[in-house]
Image (spheres, rainbow, N blue to C red):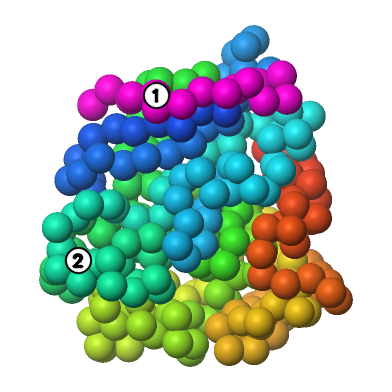
Amino acid sequence: MAPVTTLEAHGCFGGVQGFHAHDSRAVGLPMRFGVYLPPQAQAGPVPVLYCLAGLTCSEQTFAIKAGAQQHAARHGLALVTPDTSPRDTGVAGADADWDFGTGAGFYLDATREPYARHWRMESWLLDELPQVLAAAFPLRTDVAGVLGHSMGGYGALTLALRHPGVFRSVSALAPICAPAEVPWGRKAFAGYLGEDASAWAGHDAVQLLAGGARAPGPLLVDQGLDDPFLASQLQPERLEQACAAAGQPLTLRRHAGYDHGYFFIASVIGDHLAHHAAALAG
């Protein structure tokens, strides 16, 4: 296993916020990620909460902007912030659009060329990164939750539904709830998976729920009502309907006056950390 290189480390709420890189065999390129170790990690391994960021973001965005470390320090949770795509891939056109390619990996394994070689985010996140983390940090990688924002919220929902038993808790902030039905998702799925929409169903939370998949516990979702992407891209009502039909417990909270950005995330992130801490305790 390739060694981890620490790029930065900063004291934070009694713990350490670090940013790191390793040579990924799954992706075939260097991949970056952040780890916040709470003060409790000084005494032994702590549970892990994966925090998946949205379009255009990096491994630093959530760690710097969400204000989650103060809550993680109180609950004794490590925060892992993966990058949102491979970088410097050499793929022509990968940097052309903000909502596809670089910074827009959609947390899946691409099957369509030229993306199939390096856009293997699902394999990296679920198979390789936990091994890297367990070898390099005092983490209980077998006790993990996942949350995400926007594209990352889509990733949190679908990865938890696709891989039962990997995560003990899941939540999302302004997630893309039905990606196969909205422009961001259709563009990504066509580019990464091909034009056959039947291949998309396994990466759509609404369709996964309809097909019998279930989350590892109650879902917590927060959505701002002043979000400019609410009607066109996010459509939480579809998730609400799918959960009701499937008998999947869901708490969907709608917030007047809040938009899609990190001021909204910072306003509700404490509730999300408490949600995960309750599930990951013990």
Left/right placement of residue 27 relative to residue 270 reads: left
- Residue found 58% across the figure and 57% down from its top: 148
Camera-side residue: 5 or 80?
5
Dividing the picture into quarters, in which one does residue 100 lie? bottom left
Q: What element does badge 1 sit on?
A: strand
Query: Disc 2 marks which residue?
Result: 115
Q: State the separation of the CA atoms marked 2 and 1.
A: 28 Å
Mark positioned earlier in the residue sequence (2 or 1): 1
- Residue found 33% across the figure and 25% down from its top: 4
In the rendered view of the protein, which quadrant contains the C terminus?
top right
Q: Where 30 sits versus 188, above or below? A: above
Query: Disc 1 marks which residue?
Result: 6
In the rendered view of the protein, which quadrant contains the N terminus?
top left
Say whether residue 214 is visible. yes
- Residue found 84% across the figure and 74% down from its top: 257
Q: Residue 219: where, in percent of width, then height?
A: 69, 62
Q: Is residue 170 magenta?
A: no
Q: What element does badge 2 sit on?
A: loop
Total label count? Answer: 2
Camera-side residue: 228 or 45?
228
Say whether residue 163 is visible. no
Q: Which residues are magenta?
A: 1-16
Secondary structure mostly seen in magenta is: strand
Q: Which callout, 2 or 1, points to the residue nearer the camera?
A: 1
| Amino acid marked by disc 2 | Tyr
Left/right placement of residue 176 relative to residue 231 reads: left
Q: Residue furthest right?
A: 256
Q: Where 210 sits versus 152, above or below? A: below
| Amino acid marked by disc 1 | Thr
